Image (spheres, grey):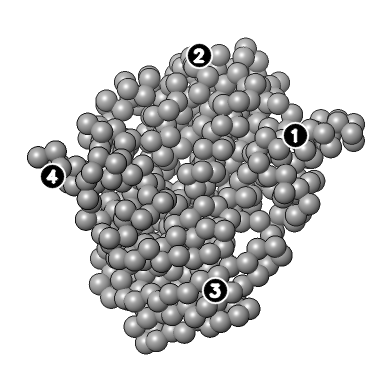
Amino acid sequence: MKVALEDISFSRGPFTLRGSGTFDAGVHLISGPVGSGKSTLALLLAGLLRPGGGAIRRDGVSSALLLLQFPEHHITSPTVAEEVRSWGLAPDDVLARANLSARANDDPFHLSRGELKRLTLACTFMRNPDLLMLDEPFSSLDCTAKRMTCRMIEERDAGITIIFSHERAVLPRVDTIWEMEGGTLTALGSVPGAISRWRHAPPYLAYALEQGARPENIRLSDAQEALCRTQG
Amino acid sequence: MIRITGLSHRILDIPDLALDARHIAVIGPNGSGKTTLLSVCSGIEEPDEGTVRLLGRPPSAVKVGWVGEFPDRTLLFSRVYDEIASTPRFRHCPCRETDERLRAAAERVGIPHLIERTVTALSGGEKALVALAAASADDPEVFILDEADSHLDAGTAERLRAVVEASTAAHVLWCTQSMDTAAGADYLLFMEGGAVRHHGTPEEVFARLEETCFYPTLWRVRR
């Protein structure tokens, strides 16, 4: 299973996005500043936009799903339970998972921002597509919910997971790191080798690298363990 | 000073709180009442019971610059120009002053290149910067930011912090899910279940939260 970007380009006004590379089964993190083109790339990978040049080829991918950055953009139904049904899912399972069982009959827009994000995340993971694209899955969440999201990402045992995020504190274990800057996608390669090349590394990871530590992955616990090893 | 007395509103229950600090960060789990507190302090909502005073006045009598988390919900106009201009226009500023104010605000926030764009063509983070420019266009006395950094990368979040820092506002009340950012505030409120569970300097409050994930990542690795 894989998705390959073959010299794609996409322009809108003065902005041009370019990228090449292959996403194999596993967890891929694409980081980059605001406006660098992360969400546009997510829409291209999801097939919601067509590249102006080049091609995006899917191999062995039978289902794909994009979780949008702003959870309210997913909402199509007047109650939380109906919203879950609109994803083709049974409300009981999803709401238990999202810790929202008591809110089944509420208007989705009466949920808090974090609750709404938990709802769309739970729906997304329950659908368990071959190709899962998560656009800023951690924004709006408190650290407890971010950790839960990391667990859901890490527990996906098959498929391709691509995370578009600028999260700087709570991150999952990932297989590869990519950077997006000024519309250009750059593959940094596999973790742990890619970590030292990662210019957008979160502060705790940058600190560990400065101290000469070599974290095995990108989580806070990886940085702490690596620091313990260097400090004996 | 921000003074809260006998406040009871939706899930909020804050008997008495007086805040002198300039940069006040509000942290806590989703659903703990942070946004409700900010809404009441900004005058967007009237409390069911109790009073809030900013600089000795009710919030409605204070120039408050509000930046929310979801700019899509607060952006009113289709052109960036009109969005930023709306703040001085709503205060009946003359056209020339409105134009000067919006250009100065766009300059401060670092988005003069976006002025002629339409809002729909912007990224999520760019929309947040437009909302910040609109909020700062008439020199607010109090800035209130509701997880405005949630959709921003580190560089943009730093720009937001710098704009707010350099403003003439007497108070900056902001809630954030970044504990590393909150560690830079003068004073912290940790909310849980509608109550202010801990308050004090970042050192004091984080000392109570060390066993939780509500703790700065940099403090963890630097120990």
Separation of residues labelled 3 and 4 (CA atoms): 42 Å
Label annotation for residue B20:
2
The disc labelled 4 sits on which kind of residue? Answer: Arg
Pointer 4: residues within 10 angstroms few (<14), some, or many (20+)?
few
Separation of residues labelled 3 and 1 (CA atoms): 36 Å
Pointer 3: residues within 10 angstroms few (<14), some, or many (20+)?
some
Depth check, mark 3 against mark 4: the one in front is 4
Q: Residue at x 29, y 33 (%)?
A: B219
Identify the chain of the residue marked 4, using the numbered disc in the image.
A
Q: Position of residue A26 (x, y in %)?
A: 30, 71
Circle 1 residue? B104
Q: Earlier in the sequence, mark 2 or mark 1?
A: 2
Closer-to-camera residue (A107/B18): B18
Q: Is residue A150 left or right of residue B34?
A: left
Same chain assignment for discs 2 and 4 = no
Closer-to-camera residue (A199/A110): A199
Identify the chain of the residue marked 2, using the numbered disc in the image.
B
Q: Residue at x 53, y 27 (%)?
A: B173
Q: Position of residue A34 (x, y in %)?
A: 55, 52
The disc labelled 2 sits on which kind of residue? Answer: Asp
